[in-house]
Amino acid sequence: MSLEEFLLEKKSAILKRWFDSILETYPSDTKQFLRTKKDRFENPVAHRISSGIEGIFSQILNDAKVEDASPFLDKVIRIRAVQDFPPSQALAFIFDLKRLVREAVVGDTREGQLSEELWRLEQKIDEMGLLALDIYTKCREEIYELRVNEVKRSVGRLIERANMICGVPEKEEDPEVCSTDNLT
Amino acid sequence: MGIWVSFFAVIALVLIPLVGAQGAGQYLFGIVIPYVAVLIFIIGFIYRVVQWGKTPVPFKIPTTGGQMKSLPWIKSNPLDNPSSTGGVIGRMALEVFAFRSLFRNTRVELREGPKVSYGSNKWLWVAALAFHYAFLVVFIKHFRLFMEPVPGFVTLLDSVDGFMEIGLPRLMMSSIVLLLAAIYLLLRRLAVPQLRYISLAADYFPLFLIIALAGSGILMKYFLRVDLTSVKELVVGLFSFRPTIPEGIGAIFYIHLFLLSVLIAYFPFSKLMHAGGVFMSPTRNMPNDNRAKRHINPWNYPVKVHTYDEYEDDFREKMKEVGLPVEKE
Amino acid sequence: MAKVAPPEELSRVDYTPPKKGWIDKPAELKEGRWCYGSKPKDHEVVGLPNPRAWSPGDEDWKLPDNWQEIFLDGLRERLDKFRTFRIFMDICVRCGACSDKCHFFIGSGDPKNMPVLRAELLRSIYRGEFTTAGKILGKVAGGRKLTYDVFKELFYYFFQCTECRRCSLFCPYGIDTAEITIIGRELLNLLGCNIDWIMGPVANCYRTGNHLGIQPHAYHSMLEFFCEEIEEITGILPEPSFNRKGAEILFITPSGDVFADPGTFTAMGYLMLFHYLEGMGLDITWSTYASEGGNFGFFTSHEMMKRLNSKMYAEAKRLGVKWILGGECGHMWRVCNQYMDTMNGPADFLEVPKSPLTGTVFENAQSHKMVHICEFTADLIKHGKLNLDPSRNDPYKVTFHDSCNTSRGMGFFEEPRYILNNICNDFHDMPINTIREQTFCCGSGSGLNTDEIMDLRMRGALPRANALQHVHDKHGVNLMSCICAIDRATLQALVDYWIPEVEVSGIHELLGNALILEGEKKRTMNLRGEEFPWVEEEEEEAAEEAALEVNLEAAEAEAEEVAAEAAEEAVEETAEETVEEAAEEEAEVEK
């Protein structure tokens, strides 16, 4: 029996525990809301997390390239990047999977056959962790870009208009005829 | 913490008449306290309503839960966004009799896959309705204690209420429903962490009180039978302002009566005033017709504004430069 | 040396709050969740109390010594002035129906973002300081004293509420958390605690008439600039008038439409619509004095709202117009609908609005005399007054975001949808529990559209983004339209973060695309200056056609020659065939 088959068998149990362990990082009052509210529109956080981790898990099962998990990692990380978590905690959930898989394997009669593959799986999860770091950083960068862009947009046309008035001097020695004074 | 304070407070309230309603104490618990409680209730209730009533409503800010009345060919929603008094009455009736807003907790659910299903979160709505209606029925049925002859609607209610024909005396649905609904509302507060977080002693206390009240009533009716004739004599006496204390009414009756007294005396000073407040809530008792009818704010006062003249003084030259018309050249 | 926890434990820090109830523990203020403090100069312009340099991150907020007295007196005064406020303080049963309705709670999970608790923050002070039970029993009765930390907590959470009113819809007693937030902020303002993003626009708006502090000549020149752009796109130059006395209608729109993308494209849509209608008898003017539809005073205090709003009626009166037309804006319409007539009316110097083009009398606005441009436009379309080509919006698959203020402040749902269905061919609504009266906030309303709290805003925007994602995945929606200037500005950040494939627009931008102006040149681009995707194709086709024509001519000439030759040589059959071939070719080209 391969680890793949083993994980397929345990998929729903592991996913459930993975989801729960992510919820553990939220305040208890919130946890209950996230867990019980089933409507995906009224509980987008849980919806995104559960569909994200399912995607990640499937990618692992399919033995796909690590990069292919990127859209699913993004789904989860994009939320956690704006939720007051320090980076280490925002991303800890990925490494949690190692623990969960090990816990599932330990005690199983097939433990012996799986150890080799388990090691490879853990390596893959580590790689995902690195990829997650990229995604997290990208999200944070986007946030700062948004801040800059928004400020630019809020006076977007004004700047454009001002730049039009702001002409290039005819000759080099001329003073710049750039004055936006009358616009502010 | 709030829950324990409330719990022990109600336990104490049960024990007080158990100890006190003996001998002369019966006059205190059978006559004085009920009268005082009713007095507090009436004065307190009126005080609160008058206090609300005399507080002005400076702006008309109704809830708008549907399409407003606008162009004649656009279908408006007169109940969820009323523009007339009739609509307001309709909305209020839906709110008071059917708890419309709680019912709104319904929604379309899109679970995994393309299947759309209609899920809902109506438990609160069901429990709240059950609780309030059961309370109303139980309340009306108590009319037989002080009305002679017993009015027809009370008898009718009784026969409907006891349709299950279980036990002797017949088991009344209303009291069971009341008790169960109150217990559900209590458990809900305890089981949902969000709710536990927001709940105060003031939320647990009335629930414990009502559970104890209903519990003592059920005990009295089915288990620790009291002499109904004596009870009626006492109650009729209270209502006819010729109070008497007949012999031989069990302690359980005094507990029941005392809990009721506490409840009605507590009523005006608590969140139970929502019963009056719902009618006076300006977001629900006003039509959404601001643009058609001017609402008057009694304390509207003049404010300092930046006038056009001041503005033109600031910018006249610049305005003239681009050909904007000015008042003063 | 301190023992370091193993990494596994470090990563599993418990976010569960202590078992203590919320009453015992005021929140710690986290950076990134509070907005920058208001600046002293802005306080001075409008005469607000306690001008000083401060930051919510500071230990000392530089409050006056008697700050508690000022706050509590203010609270008492407002309990006596607002029945809503008093009743909302008294009757909440904490049933929890509202608890999971707030976008900030849904997105962040902070329990103090539950509407009920946000209100309880103030209610607990009311109970603790004003009610007998609260004074005696303290926190058993749910009361607490107004301490410095409690005051900071109030600031923290009242500036984490966008006053969207979604919670109030589900409340069995109609308790409106927005009104509690409004009064809460008013109390904070008594002590000079506001945020820079609100106070700046307030001060600017007071002096120059709009949020950015754009002076009249600049406002004028911006709109002229748009007109030139319109000319570039359509070949027609609109000529709007400003501050013109004797016009029939005064047009007021939020200044965001004039300066901030993508609202500017909506402003171009207005200009085109007005130009189109001017030939048919529309007589309308813009104003530089009342150049702001928005009203950040609304996020400050009732009084400040009134001071800023006064310009609308004042300008209408000065110019002698008959009625006012209002642009696409959310909180502007909340103020105009629910406050303006009461505060600054009666508008008895105006007439009941009547569309000069359709003769429709707007009975629903007969008192306050202001018409929403979507009502106005919907009426025009209904009467067939507009010549529209919706196919010009074909690159867009459109959805509509109901803005909180027009939805839960008015009930304005059908008019914009009616317009959209007439100006674009591909419209899809988002799921029913996320639109209309149940619409989710953009996460940045009520003056919270500032960049220093971008994380908070993105969290708050998640419920909206999630619903949008659904129609994006299902129907390929790539444009979210809305009728709110703050939405146009902030939804852009929302989609950039959550669904970058989607753009944001106003409705009148799309109308401008679809509207066929008389004498316009063939449009090759939309109002954003983006070429229509079919233009290139058409050009290629046209080029091919031109090439074919040349070939055809050559073929014909050849055919003639051949025919002549054939006639000469009496080989008629060949000639006929050639002519037929040419004719066929021609027919094909025509096809």
Image (cartoon, grey):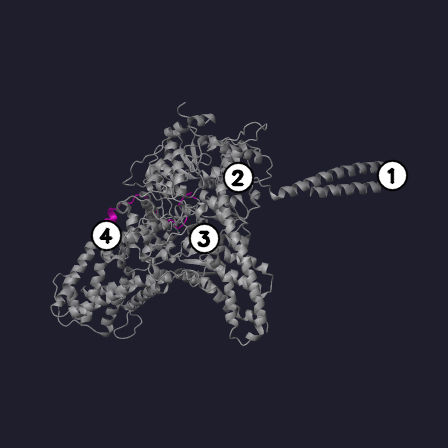
Q: Position of residue B229 (x, y in %)?
A: 16, 70
Tag nearer the camera, 4 or 1: 4
Identify the disc placed on residue B48.
Answer: 4
| Mark 1 Cα shell of 10 Å, populated few (<14), some (14-19), many (≥20) | few
What secondary structure characterizes most of the magenta part? loop
Indicate the chain on which mark 4 is placed. Answer: B
Q: Amino acid at mark 2?
A: Gly
Span colored in magenta: B47-72
Q: Amino acid at mark 3?
A: Arg
| Mark 4 Cα shell of 10 Å, populated few (<14), some (14-19), many (≥20) | some
Residue to which mark 1 is pinned:
C570
Q: Amino acid at mark 4?
A: Arg
Instruction: Tell whether position B87 is magenta.
Output: no
Q: Position of residue B104 (x, y in %)?
A: 39, 56
Q: Is residue C295 visible?
A: no
Viewer-closest of C311 and C573: C311
